[in-house]
Amino acid sequence: MTWEELERLPEEIAGQIELWNGRVVWVRGGPGEHQIFTARMWAALERCARQDMSADADRCWRANLETNVFLGRSGKSDFVTPDFLVHRCLESPYQDVRAGDVVLVGEVLSPSNTQNDIEAKKGRYASAGIPWYWEVTLAREASAIAIVRAYALETGHAHLPEGVHPLRAANYLVVGEWTPGHSNGVQYNFPFPIDIPWAELEF
């Protein structure tokens, strides 16, 4: 399917589709908790981004949620829709967000998410060169976040046994991990200083 064909579909159908090199991928709607914790992460990241911009007028970030990220330099038939993201400010309003503009993408993982789905989407983000990927895993037995993980895009080459080659040319490595037991909340310094008390992430 092309982007033009997608635009002709009713919004309630088109909104559930990502295009991966023109292939239709259905995006399953999550439970209410998924929406709430997506909004919590977006609001916290927006606050941190604004604080960073106020400290340096040369930096300009936009935190967003459920926004299409187009993976090619042109065309629109290859895109993913992260739950939350931060990108550099664009030159004009209503401009398409390209992977090269994005510094951080994130997914809120409900218990119904499969490992195959998670890894496939993470691989697309990595192949597009997006430097930071965050996962927010929801608890199975409560309306709460179980764990937040930050991943950095590996820019060097892994040392593998002779004759062994990575499945993908780019990959993410876990660089931060937080649970509600961390009394100081989520704290990390990239791509800008992030400091999120757990109280901001509660249901």
Image (cartoon, grey):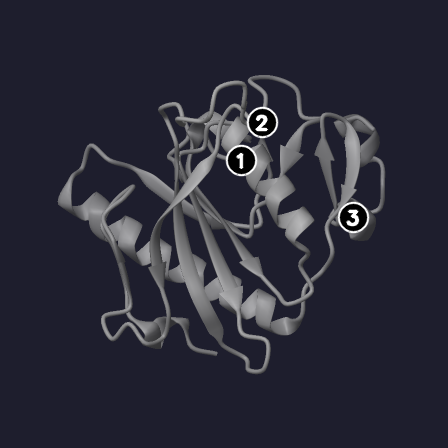
Residue at mark 2: 71
Residue 11 badge? 3
Residue at mark 1: 125
The mark that comes first in sequence, 1 or 3, is 3
How far, Cα to Cα, is label 1 from label 3?
Answer: 25 Å
> Which class describes the residues within 10 Å of circle 2: few (<14), some (14-19), or many (20+)?
many
Kindly tell me whether residue 42 is visible in this rendering: yes
> Which quadrant of the figure has residue 45?
bottom left
How far, Cα to Cα, is label 2 from label 3?
Answer: 22 Å
- Residue at the image point whose x is 58% and y is 82% from the top: 141
User: Along the horizontal axis of the image, is 90 left or right of 198?
Assistant: right
Marks 1, 2: nearer the viewer = 1
User: Along the horizontal axis of the image, is 17 left or right of 198?
Assistant: right
- In the rendered view, tell whether residue 54 sits above or below residue 143: above
The x, y position of residue 174, in whole percent, is 39, 47
SS assignment at label 1: helix
**Which amino acid does the dot numbered 2 rest on?**
Leu
> Which quadrant of the figure has residue 164?
top right
